Image: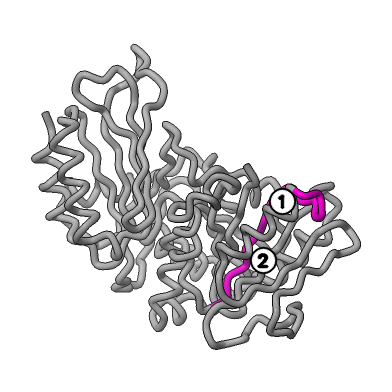
Amino acid sequence: MIPVTILTGFLGSGKTTLLKRILNEKHGMKIAVIENEFGEENIDNEILVQDSAEQIVQMSNGCICCTIRGDLARALGDLAAKKQSGELQFDRVVIETTGLANPGPVAQTFFIDSEIADEFLLDAIITLVDAKHADNQLDEHEVVQRQVGFADRLFVTKSDLVDEAALSDLRHRLVHMNPKATIKVVNFGEADIKEIFDLRGFNLNAKLEIDPDFLAEDEHDHAHHAHDHGHDHDHEHCDHDHGHCEHEGHHNHRHAHHDDKIKSFVYRNDRPFDANKLEDFLGGILQIYGERLLRYKGVLYMKGVDRKVVFQGVHQMMGSDLAAKWLPIEKKTNKMVFIGVDLPQDLITDGLDACLA
């Protein structure tokens, strides 16, 4: 299986800078890059070959660049065929979307098209966020919110242009939109290759990382029924790779309130689910709200099942699998995260409660 990374982010967020760095670094990998220029606008044309037909260009370090306008599945199929025939050699694929693109349909290609799914494995969606302009862009363009919501990892660029408080506020805002994506501050595309590839964001596994600040805040809100976000919380643990750890000990943050359409919530419950009830309920939710659900993921405790059940999805495409056995020392619990556009949190939460055994 050829791993694929989707690189997304709004205009000027630094995708091209990061891509150039990936292509020029001496990492010994042969990378095929697809510039996915769909739609009318030809915008990110800085390093594109200006031609209406597909162009495949071999670069000196063995990377391949390929400009696509139109059918991504066809382009991936062509690449796979050329690899099988020995015409092209590459280890992985990076797809750079246009700055105005919603990454959802790109990600769905890997679930809908069985021929693509047989050859390629979607590894992760990486979204670049411009620290200087992010607040305005998130306010004005829903597609920027979608880019954040779909991400497995968020790279915050141009942080040198803002102060520490603005960076902290931005991080807070991003976490509320997507608490499962790790946030990393990068300057001038200086991201370690290990932080770009083999993230396994789409693997079905029994690990569900959710930003601990988000969970702490979530518990605080439920305990006090207050949503002022102006509370103190103690950060003794700063091991969760966020590029910087500006919170030592206690502090008090007043965060500007942004009413983002894309929000996330986490469902947790220690009682087991009834498998049939849950399957029916999730099926119904996907039918009604599938387009509004960007990413969702969970590790589930099922009645009568001694193993963890893991599930995840993009829009209406959901997959689930049995994972490792619950260890005797582990607390059996359900943990699910939903990221979407104007999701009816209460309705979904109540529905999930009704599925408990």
Considering depth in this image, is 264 or 199 the residue closer to the camera?
199
Q: Please tell me the numbered disc located at residue 192.
A: 1
Residue range (magenta):
85-99
Membership of 96 in magenta stretch: yes
Image position of 257 with respect to 137: above or below: above
Is 257 or 261 nearer to us in this picture? 261
* Residue 103 image offset from top left, x and y in percent: 48, 66
Residue 297 against residue 186 in the figure, above or below: above
Left or right placement of residue 35 versus residue 182 in this view: right
Would you say residue 247 is visible in this rendering?
no
Q: Quadrant of residue 50?
A: bottom right
Residue 204 sits in quarter:
top left
What secondary structure is marked by label 1? loop
Q: In front: 235, or 194?
A: 194
Q: Residue at the spot x=33%, y=45% of the render?
A: 215
| Numbered label attached to residue 228 | none
The label shown at residue 34 is 2
Sort mark 1 into few (<14), some (14-19) or many (20+) by Cα contacts within 10 Å. few
Q: Position of residue 127 (x, y in %)?
A: 54, 63
Q: Residue 321 vs residue 74: left or right?
A: left
Position in image of residue 249 (x %, y %): 45, 45
